[in-house]
């Protein structure tokens, strides 16, 4: 599996296969969440719950597997000294918004599926969902910027050997 992830990518940049896949699946997550919002607007709450739950789970796998490790290996060692460099501040901004999005998103998902422990149950669903959706979209946008900064015209791209 690691060998497959570290093969050259398919988008013609200096990214490896894993990073290209992360970008595509990340964009798919954003599309699923947006379709889910439209379903909710149309009153189709059952389908809405399925879309958002699937997208949030897919995203959690991506972040915990394919983002946390490169963050640890390529970004964390330069902090805080190199935070004034674009590579670092763009990725840290992304990780910050992404972390908030993931936390909100998982809270809402667990609550909506009846899995949240009693003291943390909340009823203002709509507010939480709107904030979670906004944060996911912003994290995705910043994720695309991360991809470009890391792999497009970067003379020294952070790629695993
Ligand atoms: C809602 C949560 C998040 C979303 C929607 C999201 C989305 C994305 C997207 C679309 C990319 C571009 C694909 C790529 O360059 O590989 C990306 C890359 C990346 N993200 Fe996230 N992200 C989230 C959370 C996080 C968090 C919490 C961290 C910090 C630990 C993080 C760290 C990274 C890193 C280091 C990359 C570059 C990975 C690589 O290219 O190998 N992300 N993210």
Image (spheres, rainbow, N blue to C red):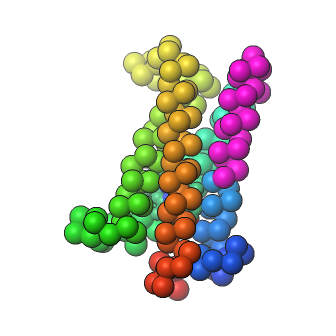
Residue at screen point 69% across, 78% down:
12
| 60 to the left or right of 17 | left
Q: Is the magenta stretch mostly helix, strand or loop?
A: helix
| 136 to the left or right of 1 | left
Residue 15 picture location, percent across and down: 59, 75
Can the viewer see residue 67 in this picture? no
Residue at screen point 39% across, 53% down:
93
Near-viewer residue (17 or 137): 137
Residue at screen point 37% across, 57% down:
92
Reply yes or no: does residue 29 show up in magenta.
yes
Can the viewer see residue 83 in this picture? yes
Above or below, comparing residue 27 to residue 73 in the picture: above
Residue at screen point 62% across, 25% down:
113
Residue 132 picture location, percent across and down: 52, 33
Residue 69 picture location, percent across and down: 46, 65
Reply yes or no: does residue 35 show up in magenta.
yes
Q: Quadrant of the N terminus?
A: bottom right
Task: Tell which residue pokes out farthest to the top in this image.
Answer: 123
Residue 5 picture location, percent across and down: 63, 74
Which residues, given as a range, are shown in magenta? Answer: 27-47
Above or below, comparing residue 30 to residue 156 in the picture: above
| 29 to the left or right of 161 | right
Above or below, comparing residue 11 to residue 67 in the picture: below
């Amino acid at each position: 599996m690691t060998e497959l992830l570290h093969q050259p990518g398919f988008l013609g940049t200096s990214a490896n296969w894993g990073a290209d896949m992360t970008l595509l699946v990340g964009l798919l997550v954003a599309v699923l969440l947006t379709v889910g919002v439209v379903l909710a607007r149309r009153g189709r709450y059952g389908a809405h719950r399925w879309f958002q739950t699937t997208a949030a789970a897919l995203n959690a796998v991506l972040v915990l597997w394919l983002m946390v490790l490169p963050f640890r290996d390529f970004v964390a060692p330069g902090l805080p000294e190199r935070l004034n460099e674009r590579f670092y501040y763009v990725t840290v901004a992304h990780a910050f918004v992404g972390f908030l999005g993931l936390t909100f998103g998982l809270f809402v998902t667990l609550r909506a599926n009846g899995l949240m422990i009693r003291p943390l149950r909340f009823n203002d669903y709509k507010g939480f969902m709107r904030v979670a959706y906004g944060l996911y979209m912003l994290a995705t946008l910043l994720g695309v910027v991360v991809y470009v900064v890391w792999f497009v015209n970067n003379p020294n791209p952070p790629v695993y050997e």
